[in-house]
Amino acid sequence: MRDATVDAVQYDVKYADGARNAEALMVHPKTGRVYIASKNEDGGGLYEGPAKLTAGGVNTFRRVDEVPWVTDGAFSPDGKRLVLRSYFSAREYAFEDGRLGEDRSVAAPFQRQAESVTYTADGSALMFGSEGARSDVVRVEVAGGGSGGDQGRGKPSGSGGGGGEAGDQDGGGGQGGGKGGAGLGAAIVVGAGVLWFALRRKRG
């Protein structure tokens, strides 16, 4: 892959059920169809765009499934799997005929700002990223090429400090996994706040 200058095309998009907050946009590698996963504390939605986008009008995206809190997502190279990540967890879904199928937990690494994920070119592993210069990119092997089996383990491949594992371990459904991750994050924040307050009082 090399640097290149390309001409940009603008596509106007709207959601059939009103405005949404979203960070994850995925393009299916076989059909070219565009999907967007919205981000919401109570669970987001997976939105499907038209079969072909047009630059000459508004492209309406329609909700086709429910998903947890999502910061990024990616299709596997064969288009049969879709991974969605949040700040504290990630789930991989079977994907067929434009709809989500069975899902499983993926051992997502703990990162300072968990904002990106993609598959390797052969679909055998996931690459989890954060934000900022020289931040880690963590490789997580996907057992059975991502079709099932045990969870992979994260191995930092960047130059920053490595993060620990923070994958969703409950093995439940998609929405439950997203809410569980959010709950863990809230507990960590509250615990840190209590510790800081206690230390401050002791020093005072």
Image (tube, rainbow, N blue to C red):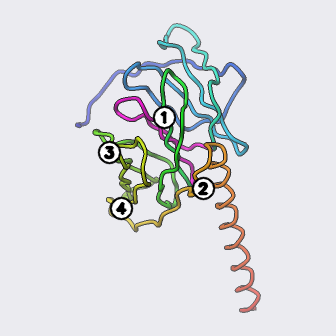
Quadrant assignment for the N terminus: top left
Q: Nearer the viewer, mark 1 or mark 4?
A: 1
Name the amino acid, label 4: Pro
Q: Are marks 2 and 1 in contact (CB under 8 Å)?
A: no
* Left or right: 61, with 187 as reference point: left
Mark number, residue 94: 1
Classify mark 4: helix, strand or loop.
strand
Name the amino acid, label 1: Ala
* Left or right: 54, with 125 as reference point: right
Classify mark 2: helix, strand or loop.
loop
Vertical position of residue 74 compared to residue 144: above or below: above
Q: Name the residue under label 4.
A: 156
Q: How far from the left and from the top, in percent, is residue 153?
A: 40, 60
* Whole-number angstrom distance, CA of label 2 to CA of label 4: 24 Å
Return the disc, 1 or 3, that comes first in the chain's sequence: 1
Residue under the point 61% across and 43% down: 174
Q: How far from the left and from the top, in percent, is residue 58?
A: 59, 12
Q: In which quarter of the image is residue 28?
A: top left
Classify mark 3: helix, strand or loop.
loop
Magenta segment: 69-87
